[in-house]
Image (cartoon, rainbow, N blue to C red):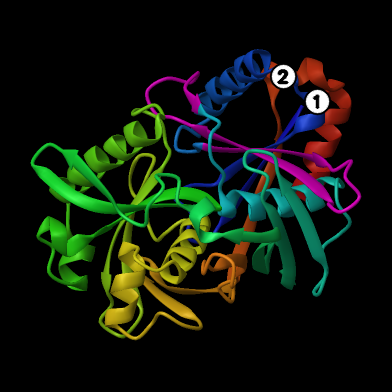
């Protein structure tokens, strides 16, 4: 079997891309195979690769690619979380799928429509630029029908009180592209953007504890990867400053799904991000987000509140200027029985060319 590696700028690690059509459909058997693949990857120096994308051509006429995300967890090669998604890994999967022949060659203006099996998301990846070793995209998370704001609040309210150690604070639990807990950093004693970006292990530990409490509030495993968590406050140059947590530790920027979720949260009245955005006059139009890895931006488009219930709804969210570098293909020896070894070796060489 062939493994592919691709890196989306801003992600904490490359994504390990595999052909889902050659793997078992049963989760137990699938995860046993993925554990073998991880052991092989670790032995080859890839212990830092904790994102896995399973892709195949979609049978649905509206989509080009079916995508399933698997978050590998630190500690052991057989620890995984199947609950969420990853936007950076979607883009990495698109590039790898095109390199392997699963998709046509990418060209500027092409639109790859991806169905996310983890949560039902529809993602359109529009190619802006193609280079020898990668591509750049504009990414849009499209709703098949307007999603009322209330359905984006898994705890049932714009703000939810949580208790974690010495911290008793309110977070906003929002589910758009991924589930996130957003907390006002000032409630944790962090006064401004400089302090937020310079914070170390103490704040990281407090956020991880709040994340575990948020998982418990949703009935999810406390030691999993979801929901994600990010501390936010008004940015120095307008917009919102965000510091996010990933697996493991601080995120080098913020996840693509985190950008989408934060952009959505700003549009939902009463949430922590909505309140912070209003402080900076950033509650309408393009939202600029400052992170330790630079600035990014998102546009979340919402419907006018309906006369029936007075509640708005999400239509789509778009993030531009996302680039991916293809890092190569290789024969995945422990899973070579899933594909003729001679064919696998030839495909790996052609994919790396």
User: x, y percentage for residue 2?
Assistant: 75, 32
Q: Mark 1: few, some, or many residues within 10 Å (few <14, many ≥20)? A: some
Query: Is residue 192 shown to the viewer in this render?
Result: yes
Residue at image coords 54%, 47%:
14
Q: Which residue is mark 1?
A: 22
Q: Quadrant of residue 58?
A: top right
Q: Is residue 69 magenta?
A: yes
Residue placed at 51% from the left, 49% from the top? Answer: 178
Q: Residue drawn at (52%, 56%), measured in percent from left and top?
A: 257
Q: Which residue is mark 2?
A: 335
- Report whether 82 appears left or right of 229: right
Q: Which residues are magenta?
A: 51-80
At 48% across and 59% down in the image, what residue appears?
261
| Dot 1: element | helix
Relative to 76, is 56 above or below? below
In the displayed structure, does residue 42 sit left or right of residue 91? left
Secondary structure state at the residue bearing disc 2:
helix
| x and y percentages locating residue 284 in the rendered image | 46, 82
The vertical placement of 88 against 224, above or below, is below
- Given residues 39 and 284, the one toward you in this image is 284
Residue 308 placed where, x, y %? Answer: 59, 67
Nearer to us: label 1 or label 2: 1
Percent position of residue 19, x then y: 77, 34
Q: Are marks 1 and 2 in contact (CB under 8 Å)?
A: yes
Earlier sequence position, callout 1 versus callout 2: 1
Characterize the local packing of mark 2: few (<14), some (14-19) or many (20 or more) Cα atoms within 10 angstroms: some
For the residue pair 276 and 115, the one nearer the viewer reads as: 276
């Amino acid at each position: 079997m062939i493994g592919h590696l691709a890196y989306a700028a801003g992600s904490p690690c490359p994504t390990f891309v595999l052909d889902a059509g050659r793997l078992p459909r049963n989760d137990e058997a699938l995860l046993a195979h993925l554990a073998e693949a991880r052991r092989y990857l670790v032995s080859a120096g890839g212990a830092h690769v904790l994102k896995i994308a399973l892709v195949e051509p979609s049978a649905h006429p509206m989509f080009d690619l079916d995508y399933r995300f698997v978050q590998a967890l630190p500690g052991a090669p057989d620890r995984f979380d199947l609950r969420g998604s990853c936007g950076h890994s979607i883009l990495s999967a698109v590039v790898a799928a095109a390199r392997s022949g699963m998709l046509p060659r990418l060209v500027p203006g092409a639109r790859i429509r991806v169905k996310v099996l983890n949560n039902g998301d529809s993602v359109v990846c529009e190619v802006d630029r193609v280079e020898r070793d990668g591509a750049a995209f504009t990414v849009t998370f499209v709703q098949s029908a307007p999603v009322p704001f209330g359905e984006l609040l898994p705890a049932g309210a714009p703000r939810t009180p949580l208790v974690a150690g010495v911290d008793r604070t309110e977070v906003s639990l929002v589910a758009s592209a991924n589930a996130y807990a957003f907390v006002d950093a000032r409630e944790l004693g962090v006064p401004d953007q400089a302090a937020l970006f310079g914070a170390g292990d103490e704040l990281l530990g407090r956020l991880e504890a709040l994340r575990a409490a948020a998982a418990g509030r949703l009935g999810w495993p406390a030691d999993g990867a979801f929901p994600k968590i990010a501390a936010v406050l008004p940015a120095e140059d307008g917009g919102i400053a965000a510091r996010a947590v990933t697996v493991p530790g601080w995120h080098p920027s913020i996840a693509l799904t985190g950008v989408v979720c934060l952009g959505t949260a700003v549009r939902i009245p009463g949430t922590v991000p909505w309140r912070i955005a209003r402080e900076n006059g950033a509650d309408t139009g393009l939202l600029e987000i400052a992170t330790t890895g630079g600035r990014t931006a998102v546009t979340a488009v919402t419907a006018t509140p309906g006369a029936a219930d007075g509640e708005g709804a999400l239509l789509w969210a778009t993030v531009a200027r996302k680039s991916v570098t293809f890092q190569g293909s290789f024969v995945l020896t422990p899973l070579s029985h899933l594909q003729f070894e001679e064919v696998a070796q030839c495909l790996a060489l052609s994919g790396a060319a």
